[in-house]
Amino acid sequence: MADTVIFRLATAEDVPAIVAMLADDPLGALREGDPGDERYLTAFARIDADPHDELIVAEDDGKVVGTMQLTYLAGLSRLGAERCQIEAVRVAASTRGQGLGRRMIQWAVDRARARGCAMVQLTSDKSRVDAHRFYDSLGFANSHEGFKLALS
């Protein structure tokens, strides 16, 4: 991946490209809708207004080629330490296999460290075996079992 990639906060104009990346895999294809759906812009506005949320894009030559959301969680555990939750990590199909995902996660870890977070955590669907190997290679430990309850 070229050194021309920059990481920045997403803007409302980035939302269609982000949604397209979220939908561009077997799981996302089942749950995402039209990138122009106003609900995405409503969600973006909420994320953008919250100082504990950051929607990040990786941009190369003016084109969004990656995205992830960082959420900073407060807690009493670990002496009141803040932790960073990384979610919705996606790399555009045209740039996969070039090291961008690794750069994105390292950037997120560095950002969390600079903010003073004590831990970075993420979840990955059990079916994403390649993603699990990727996160293992970055030093993440598969330390917890996660549970979800769909409400809709």
Image: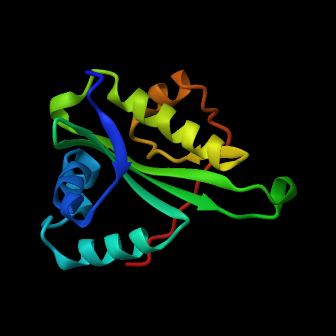
Is 30 placed left or right of 109 in the picture? left
Seen in the image, is 139 located left or right of residue 40?
A: right
Q: Quadrant of residue 74?
A: bottom right
Where is residue 79, by image quadrant?
Answer: bottom right
Residue drawn at 69 percent across, 48 percent down: 117
Residue at the spot 24% in from the left edge and 66% down from the top edge: 12
Q: Where 95 falls versus 87 (above or below)?
A: above
Residue 39 x/y as whole percent: 25, 77
Which residue is located at x 47 percent, y 25 percent? 133
Q: Nearer the viewer, residue 40 or 125?
A: 40
In the rendered image, residue 145, in percent from the top left (x then y), is placed at 63, 48
Horizontal and vertical percent for residue 63? 16, 42
State the quadrant of the N terminus.
top left
Q: Nearer the viewer, residue 10 or 96?
A: 10
Q: How many marks?
A: 0
Rendered view: 93 above or below 8: above
Q: Is residue 51 above or below residue 127?
A: below
Tell whether 9 sits left or right of 64: right
Residue 46 position by quadrant: bottom left
Residue under the point 48% across and 36% down: 107
Q: Position of residue 17 (x, y in %)?
A: 18, 53
Q: Quadrant of the C terminus?
A: bottom left
